[in-house]
Image (tube, grey):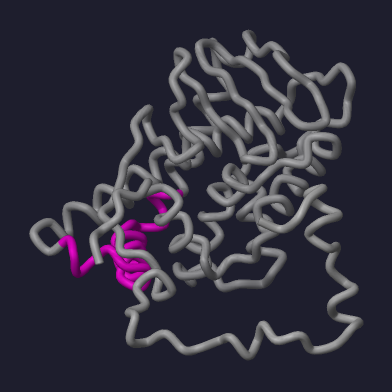
Amino acid sequence: MPMLDTPAVPLILDAMLASQPVSLGLRFRQALRDVAESQGDPLALLRNTYQRLGYPADDRVKRMAMMLWPVASVFTGFRCEREFPEPSPKFGDFHVALEAMAVYSVHVLRDVIQFVESGHRGNMHALYQTEEIAKAVAAALATRPVEVMEGLLEAAWRERSALPYVSSRVVLSNTPEQFSWSAGHDVFSASARGLIWYRYGVVWLGQGYLCGGLPCLDYEERAALRAKTEDVVDTSGAWKRQSKVAAQDVVPMRERTGGEPG
């Protein structure tokens, strides 16, 4: 089957966050909001959470897994009516944390995608299947000392806590569906699609974009799209009418369309 020219970011995120709960990003953002007045630094919150869970300090696998929490927080959809409930919001550490996690995510994703591509040049067709991408992403993360990841997040927090950002934040939109604000030449938009970062009007992160570009992989889709004709099994029996109750559960086609079924 021909390869699909597919945006790389969703594929990489699928592999990076496969072992994490779907609600992880939402829960970590809520934790950041809860401590924003006293400890809005994402890295400090990660370390304190790690200590409370009782994990050993030298367990680099668990520490690396936790260093992906900020990435999940950026790409998990927002419930703006709950996460930005104030009609006239004041900027604080929570907003700084969101910006810092976006900066951090750009660096993490860029490095992982570069590793995946450079490590498989000349053998692309052997890589771009779901299982192979997962292996490549795991290898990319394994080569990164967790201390480097911590340093990236700490530097991103310091950057977004300083001038010109700290004195230039302005609310642009505040609705139940979307919360947007500007900081310097950047615009951040939180919605059900996650956090989208615009730099000088260009999508810098979000919607598949990374550093303003749309990195792609030649990707062979999952097994369902690779099915061969000879592998197809007759399913006509599943379409036979089973009972009147089952038939009544579905609105007749005529009622939904206003005419005869086409």
Q: Give the residue displayed 57% in from the left and 48% down from the top.
A: 70
Q: What segment carries the magenta color?
A: 124-149
**211 sits to left or right of 203:** left
Quarter location, residue 168: top right
Q: Give the residue displayed 55% in from the left and 33% down from the top.
A: 100
Secondary structure that dominates the magenta span: helix
Q: Nearer the viewer, residue 170 or 159?
A: 170
Q: Give the residue displayed 37% in from the left and 87% down from the top.
A: 231
**Magenta-span inclusion, residue 142:** yes
The reply to whether residue 142 is in sight is no
Residue 15, image x and y in percent? 44, 63
Quadrant location, the C terminus? bottom right
Q: How many numbered discs?
A: 0
Residue 123, image x and y in percent? 12, 64
Q: Is residue 35 above or below residue 255?
A: above
Q: Nearer the viewer, residue 35 or 120?
A: 120
**Magenta-span inclusion, residue 215:** no
**104 sits to left or right of 135:** right
Q: Nearer the viewer, residue 162 or 103?
A: 103
Quarter location, residue 138: bottom left
Q: Is residue 177 above or below residue 15?
A: above
Q: Is residue 228 above or below residue 171?
A: below
Q: Residue furthest left?
A: 122
Residue 222, image x and y in percent? 40, 70
Quarter location, residue 29: top right
Q: Is residue 134 above or below residue 218?
A: below
Residue 201, image x and y in percent? 47, 15
The reply to whether residue 210 is in sight is yes
